[in-house]
Amino acid sequence: VGQYVFSPPKIMFVHLAISALALVQPGAKGTTQVSARRGFLAQTGAAVAASAFVAVSPSQAAFSKSLQQGFGEEAAQTGDVDKDVLSSVSADLKKVDKYVQMAKDLNAKFKANPQADIVPDLRAFDRADLRTALNSVNTAFSEDFQKQSDRLVRNIIQDLAELDTVALQKEGVERSPKKIIAIERFTAKLADDLEKFCKDVTVA
């Protein structure tokens, strides 16, 4: 039995709106155009509400559930990871694992000393190498799931770009509380985003 997800396709919206229009009967004698329009709007509203729930296949419903619950074991359980492809990109997966640990170390270092110079640590992240590894491992996901994992890859690269900006520190000048909060946020987010990406495939 198909499950239902909130997804109002434009085509169905137009179709139902036209159907609602067809339901509006010519007004009886004495009925004003305003009343007729109100009837049309009421029936159109009901049609639009009905279009909000669209039947989907069990596999589509499972995919929707994985998006709601986030990454991790759900991806593997719903068949969103191709184990054969995954085994062929194991070298790139190891690279991503390495960057996960680097991000965790960076986050721990900054927490221990918010005035520490982390620019050299950031430079250790080879952006081209990381992006290539992420995109390679990403091919192990189903086409539908890649729509979500692609977003995570972009987030990881953006995390690093944000850190490049906020981590800059003038010699002899301490970081302000505002900058410390920003760096703490992005170092934690970088580690979290990378770990989420790896969790998708390591449980497969």
Image: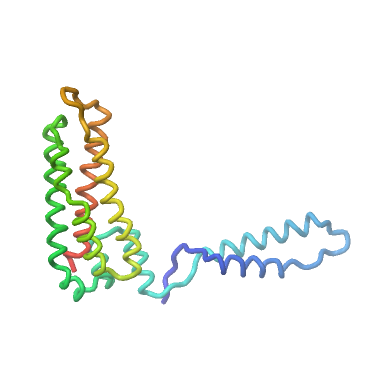
User: What is the basis of the colouring in this image?
Assistant: rainbow
Residue at left 13%, top 40%?
A: 120
Report which quarter residue 35 is drawn in. Answer: bottom right
Give the number of callouts: 0
Q: Position of residue 66 (x, y in %)?
A: 32, 63
Residue 151, percent from left and from top = 33, 56
Q: Quadrant of residue 128?
A: bottom left
Q: Residue at x 22, y 65 (%)?
A: 136
Question: Quick check: 119 left or right of 52?
Answer: left
Query: Which residue lies at the image location 61% right of the left edge and 65% below the top edge?
Result: 47
Left or right: 118, with 5 as reference point: left
Residue at the extreme top: 172
Q: Position of residue 43 (x, y in %)?
A: 67, 62
Residue closest to the eye, 66 or 136: 136
Q: Is residue 11 above or below residue 105?
A: below
Q: Is residue 188 left or right of residue 2?
A: left
Judging depth in this view, the residue of 115 and 13 nearest the camera is 115
Q: Is residue 171 above or below residue 75?
A: above
* Residue 121, image quadrant: top left
Of residue 84 and residue 14, the one placed in the foreground of this image is 84
Q: Quadrant of the N terminus?
A: bottom left
Image quarter of the C terminus: bottom left
Residue 88: x and y, percent?
16, 73
